[in-house]
Amino acid sequence: MNTTIIVNFRGNYSAYRYTIILVFDSFMKQSLLFKTLFAFLLFIVFDLQTNAQDKQKYTISGYVKDASNGEYSIGANVYIKELLKGGNTNQYGFFSITVEKGNYTLVSSYVGYGDFVKQIVLDRDISINIELKPTSINVKEVEISSEKIDKNVTSTSVGAIKLDMEEIKKLPAFLGEVDILKTIQLLPGVKSSGDGNSGFYVRGGGPDQNLILLDEAVVYNASHLLGFFSVFNGDAVKSINLVKGGMPAQYGGRLASVLDISMKEGNNKTYHASGGIGLISSRLTVEGPIKKDTGSFIVSARRTYLDVLARPFAKPDSPLKNSGVYFYDMNAKVNYRLSDKDRIFASGYFGRDIMKFEDKDAGFKMGVAWGNSTGVVRWNHLFSNKLFMNVSAIVSDYQFSFTAEQTGFELKLFSGINDLNGKVDFGYFPTIRHEVKFGANYIFHTFTPMSATAKQGETEFDLGGVKKLRAHDMAAYVSDDFDVTDNFKIHLGLRYSYFMQIGPFDRYVKDPVTGQIASTIHTDKNKKVADHGGFEPRFNARYSLNTKSSLKASYTYNLQYIHLASLSAVTLPIDTWVPSSEVVNPQKGSQYSLGYFRNFKDNTYETSVELYYKDLKNQIEYADGSLPGGTVGDNADNQFVFGKGEAYGVELFVKKRTGKFNGWVGYTLSYTKRTFPDLNRGKEFYAKYDRRHDASVVLSYDLNKKWTFATIFVYGTGNAITIPTSYYVIDGNITYDYSDRNAFRMPAYHRLDISATFTPDRSKHIERRKKRIIRKFGLAENVKPEDVKIPRKMFKNYESSWNFSVFNVYNRHNPYIIYFANEGSATEGNLSIKAKQVYLFPVIPSVTWNFKF
Amino acid sequence: MNKYIFIIAIASLFSACTEEINVKLPNSDKKLVIEGVIENGKFAEVILTRTIPLFSSQGGTTVEEFYVIDAAVYVSNGGVTDTLTIGIDSASALGVVYKGSSIIGVPGQTYTLKVVASDGNIYNATTSIPNPVPLDSVWWKAAPPEDTLGYANAHLTDPVGLGNNYRWYAKRPKDRRFIAAWGATFDDKLIDGKSFDFAYTKGYDPTDTENSEENDSDTERYYYRKTDTIYIKFCTMDRASKEFYTTFEAALSSNGNPFASPTTIMGNIDNDGLGVWAGMAASYDTILPTP
């Protein structure tokens, strides 16, 4: 399909005019939905044109920041109180509102901060930097009016949730490590895959269908130690935005969700160090200004030391002595304001999981290492107070390697994926009724499928060599958040994406009868192997029933060009990504969702009911009988089979946002099904992560300045798995015959965690110390403690807190995996089969000391 | 299998706990299992058994419970049909086997198997015997640092052209039958047309309680002694048979492995029958005690 999108700005950028001309060669062939979208686009253009002829309008624009550290606030509300209209700050804290000349009250609000209120006389364009002051936990938020705008009800987004790090840090943490991935799994529609599994599942999508971004860079494997921890260090993260439905057009490439994580920029006022010392890991963060209020940096690092702690306890001759498993990671970011119109950011992440095993007696040595690295350079530029631009250059990399050595024989397995990504995004705020976004991006993917090298002494074995795969991946999008009427708002987006696998590439064509490679089709360097592309329409709408409640609906269509198929029952770092090719078509997903949102008691309680239905095509699984070594010397996708999927469910959510006692309750009822002609004899089966019931309760209570308590309870229907139903004998060996695919349910997963955070009151401590000084130096009785001044050198002012938590309070043995073992022997007449389950975590208490200088 | 090693190690570092549980199974029918082989120069041999529900027996399952002894078994080469008769053979895996008496396996020929079970169900399968590929030479070689324990080695020249599938069996005089070693089945995907050395460890017959893996000492396990006489049976077979044996071997290594996903054994029997009907071209060699 030859399609051109021309985005044409008439006049200069500060004029209120723009037109979008979309030229569709095959417009008439498109679906009704497409035509509707096109009609909407024309309507928007018309609306903008008429708006442009209106009388005088002026723009208020600027940034919203945290007053205490200069960090930009993402998604803060900024609105005109009189009109009850406004917007949110973008990813870089920028907002722009254009309204008619007049006197207004400008309000900015953000959870955890006091409201900013300012009277303004708008008779010219105004540029303003808003600083919001954090509210301490015991200060009730400054309420400005009962009509306060609430995003839950007023935004067009269905199925999008934003979480702040501060909120997450209050919750019980497993072994004291604050974990973003574990927290989002407490939200309705997001399912954990159980203890020790790295993936998460959103609305019936697979783990590879989540787009995980850290400062715009794709993170291909978001977990450490096979899912025990996430790669995101809570100390370096500012905010988390999860989109599980109604994906806006600026995102693409995955079917199920976007997890967009923004790193902190660093305090641009004063230097600080913070960190924590826990039972198995410690972390340290240093941040400060490069130039006050202009630039700042942050560096954050973590390492687990279970291996180091365990070593002294291992017997000298035990393999444990030279074995261990640990991870470390580092985050760093710098930003600098070059001018009022330009800012640059550079950020990066590097993490590795290392596992070593050495058995000197057996002469056996093994090492496994895997991890992500990302690097991002971004440039923000304001063309005008209405047109914001960001340009990014991004590198994402994921590597896995395994080495083993025994008596001179060396084996090395490795795989990975590397992306070079260039991106440009614009935010255009022509009138208060529109927020237009458009942009484009290009990714060059390099895939390293599982490859092996082996040698015995000096002899190298031919294991097929390393055959890297390469692909171009590009997309362009345009979207508009449009207030059609006071009550009706839509988000309309269109994305076009295109993917091309290029050479050098060898396709092994197999003889269907013998299964042997019959011929090899070679594609030269940079020549096309296969290409795919298509439009991805996105549509969200909100209709406000009143100020407290609204109805929302969305339709999104997504294409996914890269895939991760897993051969084993658990998700492993060894799973490799593969591109769409002439064998593998892009995954296609349509999602329809509908939601009712209502707030109660002055927006203290947010509630919602959301329904979704998903239709998935070109889903990928390994064929029956595929073996782990089968991809060596072959194309990985030659082992795949393809099918379709379906998922639907309802999500209920109640959240208390403010007050001493807050938290949420979420419940999801869902169905996730797959149908593959070549699996389960073509019969429909439930996906492994099909979960009928999924519930979570998250509560936290601020007792006083010193003590905060929190608890989490989760419940989920067990995973659907395939198990043996009977056994038989082949060549004298006991072998199993299995049930239909995923026909068995593991026992339900449930768990209760509790935690208490103790923050000692430093002021009392200082008071006591001053009294001691008065006593010690025999000062006159009329000297009051307030009169005593301790030099900063002698008494460093720091904050610290203790976090005590108990994971799995009632010691539930949640199954990690179920397996079957045969005992005895048939020839002796005592053969029997036992079912066994492995569970990972009994009740685990932990304590962590956190500090901040 | 390497990936499992490291996961097990990680899991054990995290104090993984294993416990026995009760599992309510979906109902399963008893299915017929066929393990049939026709070898060049020999009559067809077919072992018929049935599946047994997983937790069916309280006291323990005996070999007899697997036996199917009331079926009619026919092998045809397109012209002649051989009716197999049941008999006892101590060299067979389970001791009871249906044997042919008129058709002898010939390389290049195709053979069909038909089993009529007592419940009236009919199972069919087809296989053919490829040309044998004899080993060039065989020898015993020590595995350092041991000097009296080692592996069975062989030199193979793979014929040019893909599609050769091999299975390695070995037997010492005291073994009841030929035993497939660990990972006995391989194809020429990575070795097409090459001439090379390879080695196999000692395999174990799970039905032989005397010469079992447990009865070997830690140092001797998987090794052949320098003084062993080793008979080698090296077979070629068609693709369906290879698929069966490779998936069967993968299934064995995933049995009882908590992290493996179930491997579906790809058989070539129709009508939901399990197992294989395999044509095998065997060539035999002997490794004599190394002086």
Image (tube, coloured by chain):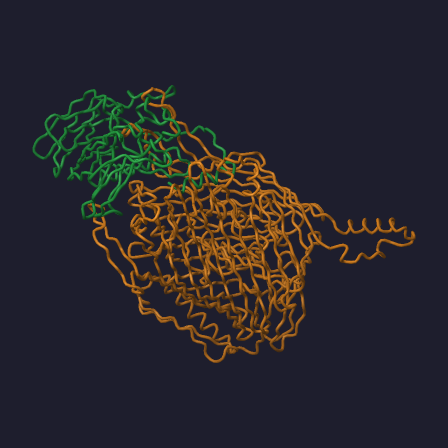
Q: How many marks?
A: 0
Q: Nearer the viewer, residue A416 or B221?
A: B221
Q: Is residue A56 left or right of residue B273?
A: right
The residue lying toward the viewer, choosing from A732 and A692, is: A732
Residue A333 appears left or right of A746 = right
Query: Which of the pair A154/A720 is nearer the observer?
Result: A720
Quadrant into which the N terminus of chain B falls: top left
Say which residue appears at 39% left-offset and 67% top-offset: A38
What residue is at 27 percent from the left and 25 percent from the top? B175
Q: Is residue A586 left or right of residue B84?
A: right
x and y percent of residue A623 in the render?
A: 31, 44
* Residue B287 place in picture, x, y as percent: 23, 32
Farthest left residue in view: B79
Task: Measuring from the top left, give residue A178's x and y in whole percent.
Answer: 58, 48
Residue B280 seen by the camera: yes
Name of the residue lying farthest toward the bottom = A11
Q: Quadrant of the C terminus of chain B?
A: top left
Depicted B46 relative to depicted A75: above or below: above
Q: Is residue B33 among what the camera can see?
A: no
Point out residue A557 in the picture as x, y percentages from the top left corner.
Answer: 40, 58
Quadrant of the image occupied by residue B62: top left
| Chain B painted colour | green
Who's orange, chain-wise?
A
The residue sitting at 12% across, 35% down in the picture is: B106
